[in-house]
Image (spheres, rainbow, N blue to C red):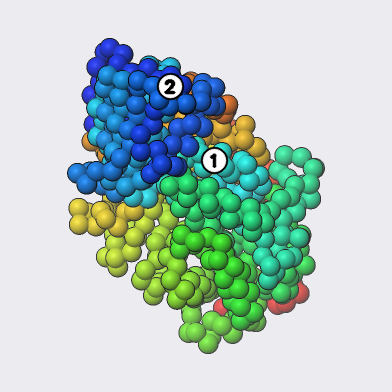
Amino acid sequence: MIYPIIPKPQKITAGDTVVFTLTKYCEIKGAERFPEAVSSLRKFLDESFSLELLGSGRETITLGLSDEIGSEEGYTLSVKENEILIRGKTAAGVFYGIQTLKQMLMYGELSLCSAEITDEPAFPYRGFMLDCGRYFFTKEAVFTFLEIMALHKLNHFHWHLTEDQGWRFYSDNHPLLTEIGSYRSHTNFNSVPHSGYYTKEDMMEIVDYAHSLHIKVIPEIDTPGHTVSAIAAYPFLSCFDRNMVTATGWGVKYDVLCVGKESTFDFIQSVLDEVTEIFTDGIIHIGGDEVPTERWRLCPHCQKRMKDEGLREESELHTYYLDRIGAYLRSKGVEVIMWNDRVKDYMPDSSLCWQFWNTDMDKNDISGEIKKGRSFIISPEKAYYLDLPYGLVDLKACYEYDPYIEGITEESRHLLKGVEACLWTEFVPDMEKAGYCLFPRLGAISESAWTKKENKSFQDFSERLEGYYKHIKAINLNYATAKQALPEGIRKTASRLYWERRRLCWGGLGNVITNKQIEKKYGKKEK
Ligand code: ACM
Ligand code: ZN
């Protein structure tokens, strides 16, 4: 029997005769030591088979720990006559063994052939990013995303909580951030207002639930760009104290935080103080992507900062800002991740971790950073941005992208912490569209995250998709069919053209006009 498990275990052998059939009488031994793994199995059996385990029968599932397993998250799984044994080095390993078992039970409709599995992850960091700034996803929806992550053996939830179009983190110190900044008057799709934010209780519940699924939560407070919602709430955060409304449409905005004023640092640091209290995993993503310098060029505060700090270009203000915020968090014992936009610039903070997203990641940039000993995560837009249509990022491109990018040597491999799938939501308003975007591409990325390169094959992955779809359907999620995920010819072109329509709602022209008005009012600085 071939078990269509995604991500594929490193080693699996299976017989052809059924030796184990799960009935409600199956007993779980060691259940009390691994409550999270057991509740994940019980939830699956209830949802997919309306089955509640009562115990005391002939069949047993035994859970336990074993020192013989090398990897912290590794496990072994063995299916024998009326008996399943799952051993992990840690509780996380047992939990992953259960995720594998869920897929086997789904495929075999509760009847299993004998099998021996030895498994461990390729990377310690296996991420999924959800953008809740553009579209708000309820707490319950976030729970569903976390469950999906666990099924795919992903272990870092990167939660993009702030955007031009919506601020979702409730702050006691600065309540207008959500009172004003969580609301936008309309969206890319229609003229209906959109809003929503997470209370501290919501976020704590989400963190607790994630931990029960062996997932760490990395909140992203994206600054100094992508901050129109914050500026709408507190205009003093911007250059020229601009009165704005939360952004409604797509595109990079020119209004960013003023890096000249000390009050900006006081404000963001006080928000981050609150963030560190809620998110206890000690990792924060500080964003840092897509920061136009137009306002800084004209702002007297920013110009004074440049002079005082001996900065030659406005772009160096961007680096100055990130370095200072990064150092602040580090002083509180927090690990810092940021997008790779400033990678070419001199960044004194040595302990940060880059998240590479640009298509044009240059091997020189990467090897330069490697020489400095900085770690990084790979999430290239051309392969791992799952909001992009299948005509731009098809299943094969997504699967075959090699995270061991040029510039990584054998000695520096440890600096590549792992990979991350990103779901931006400018054009993903709900779970239905999210499901279509994610499945089956999330399966492909999870395989690059978990399965070692030598055990990967697109052909083999494609053959396992049928079983994968069975699972996705059983949990009532939408998906793209294998044909939709690999469009060809006219369908591919149509998919690309459809995507390009988004440029119609890009604020490009508006940016140019506003910039001219500001230049007129405040005078164009001679460089
Ligand atoms: C990004 O896609 N702007 C990180
Ligand atoms: Zn300024």
Residue 161 drawn above or below residue 472: below
Q: Residues within 10 Å of mark 2 (few under 14, many from 20)?
A: some
Quadrant in the picture for the N terminus: top left
Residue 451 shows up from this direction: no
Q: Residue shown at 30%/68% (left/top)?
A: 372
Numbered badge on residue 25: 2
Gap in angstroms between the C-alphas marked 2 and 1: 31 Å
Q: Which residue is mark 1?
A: 145
Q: Nearer the viewer, mark 2 or mark 1?
A: 2
Q: Please tell me which residue lies in front, 148 or 33.
A: 33
Numbered badge on residue 1: none
Q: Which percent across, then down, holds residue 78?
A: 27, 28
Q: Amino acid at mark 1?
A: Phe
Q: Is residue 291 left or right of residue 516?
A: left
Work out whether residue 369 or residue 52 is closer to the camera in this orientation and state it.
52
Would you say residue 324 is visible in this rendering? yes
SS for callout 1: helix
- Residue plotted at (56% across, 78% down): 527
Rendering coords of residue 124 (x, y %): 33, 50
Q: Residue at x 20, y 53 (%)?
A: 410
Frontmost residue, 340 versus 200: 200
> Image point 20% across, 57% down: which residue?
411
